[in-house]
């Protein structure tokens, strides 16, 4: 184990890049629906239990299955209403289990990126070849079912090894959502030496963290989103910021939570100078316009 | 050393579910369900009539709401028993005032401990769902099948002997099941169960002894989940239920598909004097809406069954 993986260099916020997003936007907004498949009877991982109760944990399983059966359509139609294309953090086995959901998202030109095979399979304990095979499987599966080249990664159930980002870059990846250290994209050092960036993914605004870990009230979640937006929008005048709202249909799409979320979404998409986009587009734009400048100033690659 | 190579095998990676209990199906794409009288939302209010034993085993986990201090935990024992003595009657009055029909899920131990209470529920003609023996007889994956079979049979025999109407619905303590539970329930004459929370309408569920119907009892809208697990106030809980009611009514209107509002209420919780007004408020809100059909679980299941192809 190492004290710090040294994935990025220190950069103080008051010296951030004066980023301007397309059309002079000061804030890039992306919404990340996590579309996940949890297994009823996953194999045991030596370092992490998949379910708190003995298998079959029908409460945990049913909670997640609800997202695909009931919640997905609600969440998707709400994003349609506000002109948001989702950037999907995908348990890629869902391409096989629930292709109807994949088709609905593909029709809308949403972005698909890898969130592992299943959210009940963890990389803890894998050697390099094993983890590479999981990453390559996920890239291959997305290409096969959606025609998209997978550009981004959010590790399954946020399980990592020291090599995760190196391996994803080698598999053709461009960005990671696994790092929560900044409100702007930053270069990430990977052994391939290829450009690779972190696109901010707010774990603090992730509905599962909000509702399950922090046990927040639905209307308070709406306020949190508005308050985060107000601050990032204001600061974006000095240097473009990124705001991400990570969602799970099994959390946000319950009937007692939709209205409060809709109010917040209407608010943030109702402003000018907001680039409503996907993570891949943010990563590409940053690499094309700001990556070299950032590396020259703070080092990376 | 790498992980066991089997960890990278995915034997159930295929179309549909990773088990054979039910079909994969998106709610929005099903044939629309309609409710009697043209109602848009069916309302199932389930009152939990529970016994939490003082000598709780806590295996394989502490039942939600169970004893939590060293024996004898009179504190939690009596707080829960309050529901059977006081809270339930307050809830009944609130339901009556709103003209809402409840359903009761009852631990069979209640029949032995408080026969007067069960008599009263029986005489009201309201539906009674079986809820195992008591809150510490959890159905779970480590329970031997023969023990669970005996538990199901003993619970059903006891309740059926005390209740005139057929007892054909089931709710497991802690919403926990083993892999055998659905088979054992179907074999014992149960027709529907509320344990699976993956849907918002009834759906067919396969067992070795014929089909069951899953009638999902929302956990996210359960009073205990919101107030005790999430630590929200009773008024916040009332707002969430009202928001859910309004949302489902609007969705049913815009899609032409009937919806189900399934509320799990614990009399030991909402029947406290400082909380009952919040329950009254949300019940008034719901009953003040047009398009709500309040019915016992059996009628909701029957209405759904009549529309199956």
Image: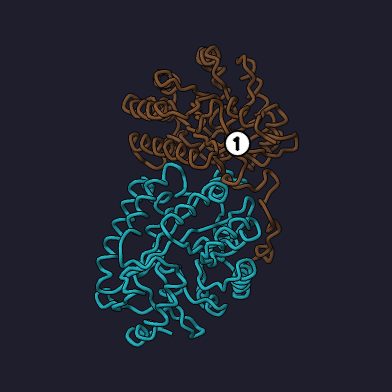
Chain colours: A cyan, B brown
**Point 68% across, 43% down: residue:** B21
Q: Position of residue A216 (x, y in %)?
A: 36, 47
Q: Nearer the viewer, residue B240 or B303?
A: B303
Where is B240 relative to A176, above or below? above
Q: Residue at x 36, y 41 (%)?
A: B231
Position of the N terminus of chain B, as image quadrant, is bottom right
- The picture quadrant where one finds residue A49 is bottom right
Can residue B159 be seen? yes
SS label for mark 1:
loop
When the figure is inspected, residue B59 is found, relative to residue A19, above or below; the finding is above
In this view, the residue in front, B184 or A78, is A78
Q: Which residue is mark 1?
A: B202
From the viewer's side, name the closer residue of A261 and B37. Answer: B37
Residue A53 appears in view: no
Image quarter hosting the C terminus of chain B: top right
How crowded pointer 1 is (Cα within 10 Å; few <14, some 14-19, many 20+) is rated as some
- Vertical order, B154 against B307 (above or below): above
User: Whole-percent x and y of residue A55?
Assistant: 62, 47
Tell me which chain the residue with mark 1 is part of.
Answer: B
Which of the 4 image quadrants contains residue A123? bottom right
Q: Position of residue A8 (x, y in %)?
A: 39, 78
Residue B33 in the image: x percent, y percent? 59, 36
B254 left or right of A9 in image: right
Q: How many marks?
A: 1
The answer to whether residue B175 is above or below residue A40 is: above
């Amino acid at each position: 184990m190492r004290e710090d993986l040294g994935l990025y260099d220190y950069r103080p916020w008051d010296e951030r890049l004066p980023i301007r997003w397309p059309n002079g936007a000061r804030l890039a907004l992306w919404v990340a629906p996590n579309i996940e498949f949890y297994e009823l009877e996953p194999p045991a991982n030596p370092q992490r239990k998949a379910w708190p109760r003995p298998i079959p944990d029908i409460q945990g399983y049913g909670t997640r299955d609800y997202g695909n059966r009931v919640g997905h359509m609600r969440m998707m139609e709400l994003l349609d209403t506000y002109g948001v294309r989702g950037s999907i953090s995908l348990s890629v086995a869902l391409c096989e289990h629930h292709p109807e959901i994949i088709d609905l998202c593909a029709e809308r030109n949403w972005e698909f990126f890898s969130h592992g095979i299943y959210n009940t399979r963890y990389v803890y304990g894998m050697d390099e070849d094993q983890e590479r095979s999981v990453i390559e499987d996920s890239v291959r599966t997305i290409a096969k079912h959606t025609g998209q080249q997978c550009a981004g990664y959010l590790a399954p159930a946020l399980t990592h090894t020291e090599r995760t980002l190196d391996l994803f870059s080698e598999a053709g990846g461009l960005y990671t959502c696994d790092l929560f250290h900044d409100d702007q994209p930053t270069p990430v050092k990977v052994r391939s030496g290829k450009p690779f960036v972190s696109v901010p993914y707010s774990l603090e605004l992730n509905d599962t963290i909000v509702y399950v870990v922090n046990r927040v009230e639905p209307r308070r979640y709406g306020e949190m989103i508005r308050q985060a937006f107000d601050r990032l929008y204001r600061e974006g005048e000095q240097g473009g910021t990124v705001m991400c709202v990570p969602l799970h249909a099994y959390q946000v799409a319950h009937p007692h939570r939709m209205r409060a979320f809709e109010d917040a979404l209407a608010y943030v998409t109702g402003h000018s100078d907001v680039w409503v986009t996907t993570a891949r587009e943010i990563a590409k734009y940053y690499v094309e316009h700001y990556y070299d400048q950032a590396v020259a100033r703070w080092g990376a690659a | 050393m790498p992980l066991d190579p089997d960890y990278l095998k995915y034997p159930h990676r295929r179309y549909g579910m990773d088990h054979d209990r039910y079909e994969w199906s998106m709610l929005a794409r099903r044939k629309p369900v309609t409710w009697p009288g043209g109602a848009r939302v069916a309302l199932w209010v389930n009152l939990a009539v529970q016994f939490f034993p003082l000598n709780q085993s806590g295996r394989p986990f502490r039942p939600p709401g169970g004893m939590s201090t060293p024996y004898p935990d009179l504190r939690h024992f009596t707080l829960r028993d309050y529901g059977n003595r006081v809270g339930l009657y307050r809830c009944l009055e609130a339901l009556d005032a709103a003209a809402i029909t409840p359903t009761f899920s009852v631990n069979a131990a209640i029949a032995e401990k408080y026969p007067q209470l069960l008599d009263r529920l029986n005489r009201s003609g309201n539906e009674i769902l079986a809820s195992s023996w008591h809150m510490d007889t959890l159905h779970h994956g480590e329970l031997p099948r023969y023990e669970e079979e005996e538990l199901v049979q003993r619970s059903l025999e006891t309740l059926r002997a005390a209740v005139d109407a057929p007892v054909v619905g089931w709710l497991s303590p802690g919403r926990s099941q083993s892999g055998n539970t659905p088979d054992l329930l179907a074999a014992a004459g149960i027709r529907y169960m509320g344990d699976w929370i993956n849907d918002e309408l009834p759906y067919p569920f396969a067992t070795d002894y014929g089909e069951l119907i899953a009638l999902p009892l929302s956990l996210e809208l359960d009073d205990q989940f919101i107030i005790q697990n999430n630590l929200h106030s009773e008024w916040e809980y009332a707002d969430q239920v009202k928001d859910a009611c309004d949302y489902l009514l609007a969705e049913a209107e815009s899609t032409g598909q009937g919806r189900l509002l399934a509320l799990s209420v614990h009399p030991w919780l909402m029947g406290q004097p400082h909380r009952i007004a919040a329950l009254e408020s949300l019940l008034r809100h719901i009953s003040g809406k047009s398009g709500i059909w309040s019915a016992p679980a059996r009628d909701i299941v029957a209405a759904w069954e009549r529309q199956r192809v």
